[in-house]
Amino acid sequence: MTKPMNRSGSRKKFHVRTPSGKLVTRFKKKRHGYRECGLCGNEVLGVGGRKNIVGRARMAKTEKSVSAPFGGHLCSSCRRHVFSQTAMVMAGEKRLEDVSFELRQYVQAAVGKATAIE
Ligand SMILES: [Zn+2]
């Protein structure tokens, strides 16, 4: 009978052949996922990595998220791209309609935030 601790969904079952030739079932903890960028899908850095809930609770606020606009949602290269597009829109070089569809919601939010500060 499987131990109660191994019946959890957070455990992954795998089979190992022992030196004596017997096939035994072993369990290991599943890895936690990572946060993906909203635009490119790459891993977002600076958000604490693969920690469980208890591990995250012990972390400082600054370790859990990036304190830049769209930090924790977009990776640094996508963020840089959004900022450059925002600057172009605000300078009047580009219209918001000309910004690519994926970037538009982020550029729109950044422009809204920048105009609210002024
Ligand atoms: Zn990205």
Image (spheres, rainbow, N blue to C red):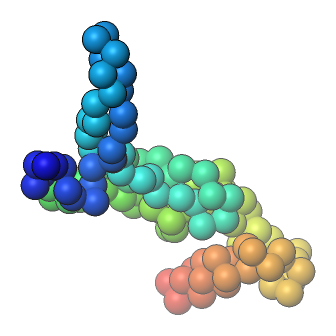
- Residue at 36% of width from left, 38% of height from top? 14
| x 36%, y 51%: residue | 32
Which of the image's four quarters has the C terminus? Answer: bottom right
The x and y percentages for residue 13 are 33, 44
Residue 82 x %, y %? 69, 66
Residue 59 lies left or right of residue 98; in this view the side is left
Label total for image? 0
User: Is residue 44 in view from this perspective?
Assistant: yes
Q: Residue at x 65, y 51 (%)?
A: 77
- Compared with 98, 35 (above or below) is above
The residue at the point 20 percent across, 56 percent down is 7
Q: Is residue 63 left or right of residue 89?
A: left
Residue toward you, 15 or 39: 15
Q: Position of residue 83 (x, y in %)?
A: 67, 65
Question: Does residue 56 lie above or below 95 as drawn?
Answer: above
Residue 89 appears in the picture as rendered: no
**Front one among 37 and 108:** 37
**Quadrant assignment, res 27:** top left
Q: Residue furthest top?
A: 19
- Vertical order, 93 against 33 (above or below): below
Relative horizontal placement of residue 37, taking residue 87 as reference (left or right): left
Q: Nearer the viewer, residue 117 or 20?
A: 20
> Where does residue 72 sit, x and y in percent of width and height?
45, 61
